[in-house]
Structures are given as structure tokens and as C-alpha cells.
Amino acid sequence: MTYQQIEQVVKHNLSEKRFYHSQCVAKQCEELAKIYNVPIEKAKLVGIAHDIAKEMKKEEMIQYAKENSIKIDEIEKYHIKLLHAKIGADICKKQFSFDEQMVRAIEAHTTGKKQMDMLAKILFVADATGDDRSWEDLVDLRNTAKEDMNSAVLYILDLNIKERIEKKKLIHLDSIYCRNELLM
Ligand SMILES: [Fe+2]
Ligand SMILES: [Fe+2]
């Protein structure tokens, strides 16, 4: 499928707001891919498609996971919405023929993971720094992302973890593994 065809499928599956988010992430992925010499087409594709499963209902997610042998871990049981990363990756693999590297990037986009490659890091950072975001340190973070990708990933992980602590929410172990790895 071409980029335009995939974009149409994504549009069909998401609200206007989240489709706009996806377009912004794709644009940000493209920009970062140019800087870090990652194939631009791959980066744009994971950007536009990463949240394709985000608006599935919880019951639909559980159903999809069962039917497609996707394991639901103990944290995802409590925060079912986290599953949109694994399910989205599975959809992209089966419906859009994304390769392993792209699938792994989408799987890692919410929590972060150990041993993320540059494409995965680009998606992780682009998800938080697209034009649809409006938080305080955005400009700084965008600049950091252009100069030091690992620092940008770490910064976003820390923000997410801090927020989860404040809200008394569970923290996925993959975020901790990812953070520790970046600090070692
Ligand atoms: Fe997401
Ligand atoms: Fe996203």
C-alpha cells in the first residue's frame, strides 16, 4: 500500500483530532529521519500509522488480542489502553505489510522499550513533539531531539513517569528498563 492509501485507512479509523495528531507525528518523524539518516518513508509510515488502534474500545482490544494471540501483560490488564501499541503494530504488520523494524517501533511508542533502534526512538520522540502538542518545554525538547536523541527519549520518559507517579498510576516495566539502559 502507498503512503496515501495507508493515510486514508488511518483517517477512517480515527477522530479528526487524533488523525491530525498522526499527521503531525508523521511530519516530525520525517524531519528527524532526515537528521539521523533513517529511511524517510519508513519514518513517515510509522508516524502516520502508530495510533491506528488507539480509538478501539476496550472490549474490542481484548477481543483483538485474543484472536491474534497478543499477550496482555499484568500492567496492560489494568491499563488496557496501553495495548493500542501492540495491537497497532499487529494491524500494521498484517494490513500494511510493515517490516519488523517498523513493527517494533510502533510496539515501543507508548512505554519505550529496551534496545530501541533509531527509528523507534524517532517515533517515540515525534509522538510527544508534533505540532499538535503545546507544552512548556516543547521548543527546547525539539532542539534536544535534533542534537541528542537519547537525551530527548530520557526527558520524555521522565516526564511520563513523573506524571504517572503523581496520578498514582502503574508504571510499565518497559519504561524503567528503557530509562535504565539510557542511563548506563
Ligand atoms: Fe499512542
Ligand atoms: Fe500518538
Image (tube, helix red, strand yellow):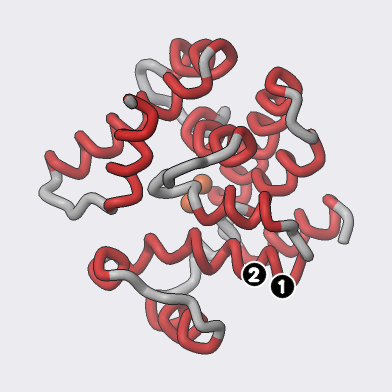
User: Is label 1 in contact with label 2 (beta carbons under 8 Å)?
Assistant: yes
Where residue 34 appears, as percent x and y from the top left, is: 75, 22
Where residue 104 appears, as percent x and y from the top left, is: 58, 53
Q: Residue at x 43, y 49 (%)?
A: 110
Residue 8 as seen in the image, left or right of residue 57? right
Residues 101 and 93: in front is 101
Where residue 96 appears, as percent x and y from the top left, is: 77, 65
Residues 171 and 9: in front is 171
Give the answer, above or below, for where 154 lies relative to 174. Answer: above
Work out which quarter of the rendered image holds the C terminus and state it: top left
Q: Quadrant of residue 94?
A: bottom right
Q: Residue at x 38, y 24 (%)?
A: 135
Identity of the amino acid at label 2?
Ile
Give the answer, above or below, for where 99 lies relative to 23. Answer: below
Residue 11 as seen in the image, left or right of residue 151? right
Q: Residue at x 51, y 28 (%)?
A: 129
Task: Tell me the number on the disc at residue 91.
Answer: 2
Asked which secondary structure carries label 1, the reply is helix
Q: Which residue is mark 1?
A: 94
Give the answer, above or below, for where 47 lies relative to 55. Answer: above
Q: What's the CA distance linking mark 1 and mark 2? A: 5 Å
Asked which secondary structure carries label 2, the reply is helix
